[in-house]
Amino acid sequence: MRRVPFSFELHPARSPQIARQLPDRIARLVAAGPEFVSVTYGAGGSSQDASLDVLKHVIEHHPQVRTMAHLTCVGSTVQAAHDTVRTFMDAGVHSFLAVRGDLPAGSPPDAFPGDIRSAAELVQLIHAVQSERRPWREVAIPGTPGIMLDRDGRERIAIAVAAFPNGHPSSRSWQQDIDTLLAKQAAGANLGISQMIFHADDYFRMVDAARAAGVEFPILPAITPVTTPAGLARNLELSGERAPEAFAAALAAEQNEARRREIGVDFAADLTRRLLDGGAPGIHLYTRNMHEVPLAVLARVGLIDEARFAQLIAPDFTGATPVEEPA
């Protein structure tokens, strides 16, 4: 069986209790062997310091896993964005998810705050800061036209961008979304991560259209495993995606918390299988800073074995920094 890459998204803790527990949860997720761990970043830099703290923790305690910093540009000046990128790079982060970010509530669609107006411009800025810090000196490999290596053997910076299976809310047409992906690629993006999805066909339709238009970088489908009706409703509201009706009905009809959890894991695992069987290059899981459900999804699909899953969720797991008891 081919080794299927998977990755996790985290966010800065929103309460002291979760902040105390987060190092243990991160350790369990990292021990599963993800390709990378990304950390969200609030619009306008609202959680920059908290996001950087989480990234620094992962870099210090789990250097074997690649970290990816989310960056937004709404409301930012060029200098502020430059300084932020430089700060993250100096901390050891060399992968980024560059997104425009949401406009402030009530903003007219044609009144964009800040100097950087698109994710493509942010991608260009990230590359510029990297070049400024450590100029990329490429050399050709004899006999392999088009293949270049850095003279110092350094890893080329990875910049991911968002892809929207059913269109960005502010897009005027489906074609505009595909053109936007092409612009991001031209700016230097080399990975796509989809908006959270609940229907495999939506992802495949987007990928087929992107490939036909000339988008070459891999596009990872992103899944949020949800286990409650309220959680599903919230995620649908955030993403604007259409509801998976049978799944929504099953969650609503079940009152037992443990059984709801199984329904949620089953749905996410089935969706993951369909995505991978259809050719998706990997899977990106939004964890909501939890470890049990995302790891259960991976185990259900066979991306980690059951014995490893049992170890990773065991109360006496010892691969983490000691955690204080919740207050």
Image: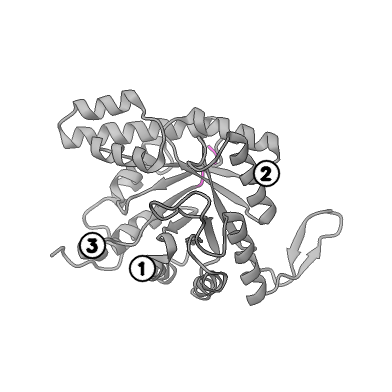
Q: Is residue 318 visible?
A: no
Verify whether residue 285 appears in magenta: no
Query: As drawn, is 264 to the left or to the right of 204?
Result: left
Residue 315: horizontal and vertical position, in percent? 21, 54
Residue 242: horizontal and vertical position, in percent? 40, 30
Q: Which image quadrant is residue 19 in?
A: bottom left
Whether residue 307 is situated above or below residue 77 in the rendered picture: above
Verify whether residue 4 appears in magenta: yes
Give the tally of numbered discs: 3
Whether residue 10 is situated above or below residue 164 in the rendered picture: below
Residue at 23% x, 62% y: name it: 15
Image quadrant in which the C terminus is located? bottom left
Identify the element where label 2 is drawn. Answer: loop
Specify the segment rendered in magenta. 1-5
Query: As drawn, is 182 to the left or to the right of 122?
Result: right
The numbered mark, 2 or 3, whose residue comes first in the sequence reads 3
Residue 106: horizontal and vertical position, in percent? 39, 51
Q: Kindly identify which residue carries mark 1.
A: 50
Q: Kindly identify which residue carries mark 3.
A: 15
Identify the element where label 3 is drawn. Answer: loop
Identify the element where label 1 is drawn. Answer: helix
Residue at 70% x, 73% y: name it: 135
Query: As drawn, is 137 to the left or to the right of 243?
Result: right
The numbered mark, 1 or 3, whose residue comes first in the sequence reads 3
Task: Identify the mark at residue 2; answer none if there is no mark.
Answer: none
